[in-house]
Amino acid sequence: MSTSHGYGRLVGFSDGVVAIAITLLILPLVDAASDFTGDVESFVVEHLGKLLVFFLSFAVIGNFWLVHHRMWDRVTGYTSGLLWSNLLWLLSIVFLPFPTALLASSAGPDRATYGLYVGTMVVTTAAELLMQWIIVRHPELQADDARGTLSVGGYVVSTGIMVFALLLAVIFPAFGLWGLALFALSGPVQGAIARSRKASS
């Protein structure tokens, strides 16, 4: 299961699924625009919430794809476990347009909608953590220039931050999705972990 042909198909399939999922985000706005008879300014004002949710989810999926791209750029093969954890990751990506649409049509703070939206991202980050764990445990999958340098620390931080954001969204729905702003801290924390790991080696 680690042939170059199979690996290329797996990565290409993953990229295609992400491209479709990120495209689906715009469809509710396209439908709204097709039935709108006013000017552009009126449309933007009336659908501002949907536009903001679209840009948020676009940025979220784009960031997840970048993480996935960097991860798979450091491996040259895969195992059945890595394949199935990648499918779990893809499932969460494909599912995200659904809570995005619910969030865009929500009239106010909705605990269930926030929980479903952020909870989907928890699954995504957990799947990333699982994939990285498998990669670290199988050095033979790693590219020569990455072998021995990979760790799960940054992915543990990302998953922990997302779980905390989920708790905030569910326990304090009035707080909304501001807990997702904490995800911006994952980059600096991962960098600090990488520097610490490099210094100790």
Image (spheres, rainbow, N blue to C red):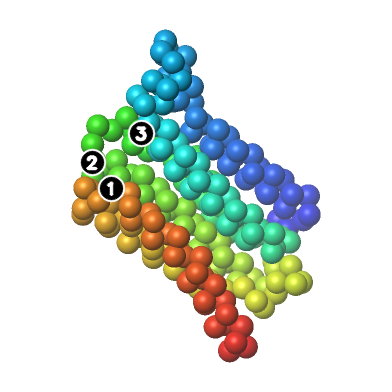
Q: Is residue 36 left or right of residue 63?
A: left
Q: In the picture, which quadrant includes the N terminus?
A: bottom right
Mark 3–mark 1 Cα distance, whole angstroms, equals: 13 Å
Residue extending farthest to the top is 37
Pointers 1 and 2 in contact (C-beta within 8 Å) = yes
Dot 3, how many residues are within 10 Å of its Cα: few (below 14), some (14-19), or many (20+)?
A: some
Q: On the image, numbered disc 2 is attached to which residue?
A: 109
Mark 2 vs mark 3: give the one in front.
3
Element marked by disc 3: helix
Q: Is residue 194 left or right of residue 10?
A: left
Kindly identify the residue that appears in the image at 23 percent across and 36 percent down.
108
Q: On the image, numbered disc 1 is attached to which residue?
A: 176
| Residue closer to the observer: 58 or 115 | 58
Residue type, mark 1 in image? Gly
Kindly identify the residue that appears in the image at 48 percent across and 48 percent down.
60
Kindly identify the residue that appears in the image at 38 percent across and 31 percent down.
48
- Which disc, if any, is residue 49? 3
From the top left corner, tell me how far across and down residue 153 is, in percent: 50, 73
Dot 2 or dot 3: first in sequence order is: 3
